[in-house]
Image: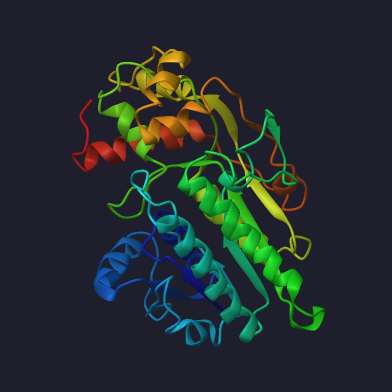
Amino acid sequence: MEKVLVTGASGYIGLHVIAQLIDRGYLVRGSLRSRDRESEVRNALSKVVNTENKLEICELDLLKDDGWDDAAQGCEYVIHVASPLVQKAPDDENEVIEPAKQGLIRALKSAIKNKVKRFVMTSSFSAVGYGHDRDVFDESHWTDPKKNIGAYNKSKAIAERAMWDHLESLPESDRIEAVAINPTLVVGPSLSDDMGTSNMFIQKMLEGSYRAAPKIHFGFVTVEDTARAHIEAMLNPDASGKRFILSEKNMWLREMNQVLVDNGYTKAPLKQLPDFLIKFLGLFNKELSVISGFVGRTKFTNSENAKNILDFKFEGVDNAIINTAKKFEELGIIKK
């Protein structure tokens, strides 16, 4: 059986990728920053797949060289999901940018050294759709990291650029096949109790701490589809060298809240914050200053590469949003 190295094994997307790989008959080597979370990962996965003799765990740090070459040894593919966690805007944006870029380069170089068949990077729509004046986006577009778009968005753009630039700098004989996956806002229940940073938007709305929702427009995709796209892009012979935006549906944050309210989660606000208020408050608050550049702007995506190259059929995000709310409820984080 072929083996796949999946970095970021404890993460929201990483767990779903590993579960789907094992379900398809692959062996998986999953990386963690610390083995302290190994039992958490195995317990989460054991609820959906049989991991016995199919999963091994290794320890890797995005900012350290130790172990990377060994981790990729014997693997036919590498799926690099690991990324710095961002709960709030950091004081120094390099706290997010450098681990993302350095970790990517370490993962890529180890994949090249071990001559894997294909390297799949978990990038983001954050590397596509920020810092320029447009409303409709495809895979040819790139985020401008020179603009005030937040450390996370910058880190994704800089890290993905680093992957393509590094491969381009190599002699053709030394290059390996590579793919970037660029999901929009990923929603759906986690396999563990760690619900992932993208689901924080749903949590904040469910808690009722906001009386009105910022007028922000997103593309949405389920976590199951996001994981499946990684594997399809890993295998599809026509996917090499491509980027894949993932978006099943584009909607305003208020429209997401309407889905929640219609299913009994009535604390989600249906009123919208005035754009001018967010822009004014952004003068005094770092996080709001980033959001203020996005309010009132539509961001439409077409996911043409996923549909045309991978023949990808997206599942609806509304059920994923509802099931995310139910998971938060089960965890005792929110109440209806």
Return the residue found at the far front: 283
Q: In the figure, is residue 270 to the left or right of 70?
A: left
Residue 260 place in picture, x, y as percent:
37, 24
Q: In the figure, is residue 216 to the left or right of 136?
A: left
Where 197 falls versus 137 (above or below)?
Answer: below
Residue 82 showing in the rendered view: no
The residue located at (46%, 34%) in the rendering is 290
Q: Nearer the viewer, residue 102 or 27?
A: 102
Residue 83 placement: quadrant: bottom left
Q: Nearer the viewer, residue 53 or 152?
A: 152
Residue 3 placement: quadrant: bottom right
Q: In the figure, is residue 139 to the left or right of 73?
A: right
Where 289 falls versus 119 (above or below)?
Answer: above
Residue 277 place in picture, x, y as percent:
40, 15
Please count the marks in the image.
0
Display coloring: rainbow
Residue 269 place in picture, x, y as percent:
34, 17
Where 112 falls versus 260 (above or below)?
Answer: below
The residue located at (41%, 21%) in the rendering is 278
Locate the C terminus by quadrant: top left
Locate the N terminus by quadrant: bottom right
The residue located at (58%, 23%) in the rendering is 297
Where 123 falls versus 70 (above or below)?
Answer: above
Residue 219 placement: quadrant: top right
Residue 150 place in picture, x, y as percent:
47, 42
Q: In the figure, is residue 138 to the left or right of 267?
A: right
Residue 302 showing in the rendered view: yes
